[in-house]
């Protein structure tokens, strides 16, 4: 259990309820805490600052319009707005694709999976600080795009497994299973390369 | 490899990429725009809440108006109809390049609508794009409002609308003539002198019955409070084609 995240979700839920009743200060606080995760998520999946700003603005505009529609029993405020951000990114890349190709009809989400996984060229290059990190990155890059998107949401956005499933519109059990399987695989491959790592506990994803 | 070590590596791998992040000033610019829209949305919500109070003067007007409009819809196949002026719709349009200060406009518009005699109720809708508002529509409900005078006064009181394109049209309800005249002459001019809520209610029901309104078609609420008597009469009549 991640107490910090649960407290964050509770705080956001309270601010949203207050904002619905006309409390402007609560609305500002909510915006203040949601801006960075949303802008960061979008920035990692767009090609320039201008698009990132436009999409971030559009997501918050939609968030404001739908303030009264949030249902707390379906997930956290953070999950809700990141799902909006994900849809905005999908629509954005579909529009780009429509302009740049002769394709008719929308681009399937599956074809945007690499973008949603936020792996564009070598964005993480500067972060590879040591051998461990390089190895983990290489192993993760071998995984399918949807798995890498799960990891990006889990470790980049700090979402719980249940929230990752909600944002990607997948079943929680299936997401949990794929996390566990991938982590086990990464760990085994790392252990095979470095015998001294043997003996550590089973790698589990914390929720 | 320990859980913690692997988790740390994964978190480091997914640290935010700062290359495409919005400019620092985008955060405050967007906040300003959102808060402005939030205030407008809350203002509209408050007006609706006031409308839902059955003892509110404007609410009573709207309920009676609703009864009239329902009559009109039911009677559309009859040839004898009467059009009732129920208010004015003002359309305020902005050019694509206009720099619209919605906070000032909203404040000015609210002050204007609150101080205009004859306006019983208002509703406002705003159509906008990413560039800002494109059209504000104000429905000002009240009988026999002077549209030209309203537009002129609006321009005078809200200088931010100087460059806006403002027009108006009449909001009208069509009513079936025979019953409409009965409503106008008789329902709106009921005479009561009862001393208690129940006496007044009984007098009104009796007069409505004399005028051909069946008991099931009328709802009469009387409330005496602080030396004032509030009376709400709702008549619903369906006319068959």
Image: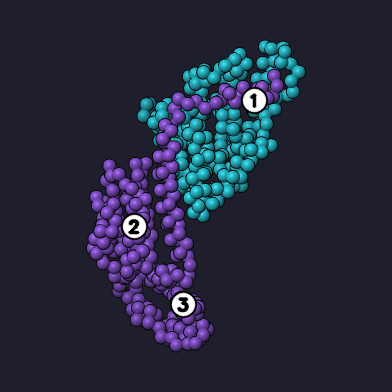
Return the disc, 3 or 2, that comes first in the chain's sequence.
Answer: 2
Q: Is residue A14 above or below residue A200?
A: below
Front tag of 3 and 2: 2
Of residues B205 and B105, the one drawn nearer to the viewer in this rendering:
B105
Return the disc, 1 or 2, that comes first in the chain's sequence.
Answer: 1
Question: Residue B233: x percent and y percent?
Answer: 45, 76
Element at label 1? helix
Q: Residues within 10 Å of mark 2 (few under 14, many from 20)?
A: many
Q: Quadrant of the N terminus of chain B?
A: top right
User: Residue B74 falls in which quadrant of the image?
Assistant: bottom left
The residue located at (67%, 29%) in the rendering is A205
**Distance from Cα at disc 1 to Cα at disc 2:** 55 Å
User: Label 2, on which residue?
Assistant: B109
Question: Residue A156: x percent and y percent?
Answer: 56, 29
User: Label 1, on which residue?
Assistant: B7
The residue located at (30%, 72%) in the rendering is B82
**Distance from Cα at disc 1 to Cα at disc 3:** 68 Å
The chain coloured purple is: B
Mark 1 near mark 3, Cβ–Cβ under 8 Å? no
- Same chain for labels 1 and 3? Say yes or no: yes
Element at label 3? strand
Name the chain under label 3.
Answer: B
Element at label 2? helix
Q: Is residue B215 visible?
A: no
- Same chain for labels 1 and 2? Say yes or no: yes
Name the chain under label 2.
Answer: B
Q: Is residue B204 above or below residue B1?
A: below
Q: Is residue A99 visible?
A: yes
Q: Residues within 10 Å of mark 1 (few under 14, many from 20)?
A: some
User: Label 3, on which residue?
Assistant: B230
Q: How is colour applied across the structure in the image?
A: by chain
């Amino acid at each position: 259990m991640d107490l910090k995240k649960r407290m964050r979700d509770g705080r956001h839920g309270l601010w949203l309820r207050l904002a619905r009743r006309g409390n402007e200060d609560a609305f500002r606080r909510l915006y203040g805490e949601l801006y960075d995760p949303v802008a960061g998520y979008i920035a990692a999946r767009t090609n320039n600052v201008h698009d990132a700003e436009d999409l971030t603005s559009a997501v918050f505009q939609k968030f404001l319009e739908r303030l009264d529609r949030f249902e707390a029993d379906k997930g956290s405020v953070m999950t809700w707005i990141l799902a909006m951000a994900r849809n905005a990114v999908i629509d954005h890349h579909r529009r780009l694709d429509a302009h740049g190709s002769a394709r008719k009809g929308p681009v399937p989400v599956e074809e945007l999976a690499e973008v949603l996984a936020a792996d564009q060229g070598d964005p993480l290059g500067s972060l590879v600080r040591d051998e461990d990190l390089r190895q983990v990155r290489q192993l993760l890059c071998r995984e399918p795009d949807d798995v890498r998107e799960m990891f990006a949401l889990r470790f980049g956005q700090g979402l719980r497994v249940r929230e990752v499933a909600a944002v990607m519109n997948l079943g929680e059990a299936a997401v949990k299973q794929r996390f566990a399987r991938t982590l086990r695989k990464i760990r085994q491959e790392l252990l095979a390369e470095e015998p001294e790592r043997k003996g550590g506990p089973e790698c589990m994803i914390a929720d | 490899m320990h859980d913690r070590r692997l988790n740390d590596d994964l978190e480091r791998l997914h640290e935010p990429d700062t290359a495409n992040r919005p400019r620092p000033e985008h955060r405050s610019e967007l906040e300003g725009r959102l808060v402005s829209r939030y205030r407008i949305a809350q203002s509209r919500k408050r007006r609706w809440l006031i409308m839902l109070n059955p003892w509110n003067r404007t609410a009573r007007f709207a309920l009676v108006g609703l009864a009239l409009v329902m009559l009109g819809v039911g009677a559309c196949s009859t040839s004898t109809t009467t059009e009732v002026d129920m208010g004015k719709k003002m359309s305020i349009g902005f050019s694509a390049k206009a720099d619209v200060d919605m906070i000032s406009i909203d404040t000015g518009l609210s002050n204007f609508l609150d101080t205009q005699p004859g306006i019983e109720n208002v509703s406002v809708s705003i159509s906008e794009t990413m560039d800002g508002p494109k059209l504000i529509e104000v429905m000002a409900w009240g009988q026999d409002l002077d549209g030209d005078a309203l537009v002129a006064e609006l321009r005078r009181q809200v200088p931010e609308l100087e460059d806006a394109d403002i027009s108006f049209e009449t909001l009208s309800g069509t009513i079936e003539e025979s019953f409409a005249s009965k409503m106008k002459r008789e329902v709106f001019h009921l005479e009561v002198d009862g001393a208690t809520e129940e006496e007044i209610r009984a007098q009104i029901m009796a007069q409505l019955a004399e005028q051909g309104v069946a008991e099931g078609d009328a709802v009469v609420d009387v409330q005496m409070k602080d030396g004032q008597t509030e009376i709400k009469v709702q008549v619903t009549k369906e006319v068959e084609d």
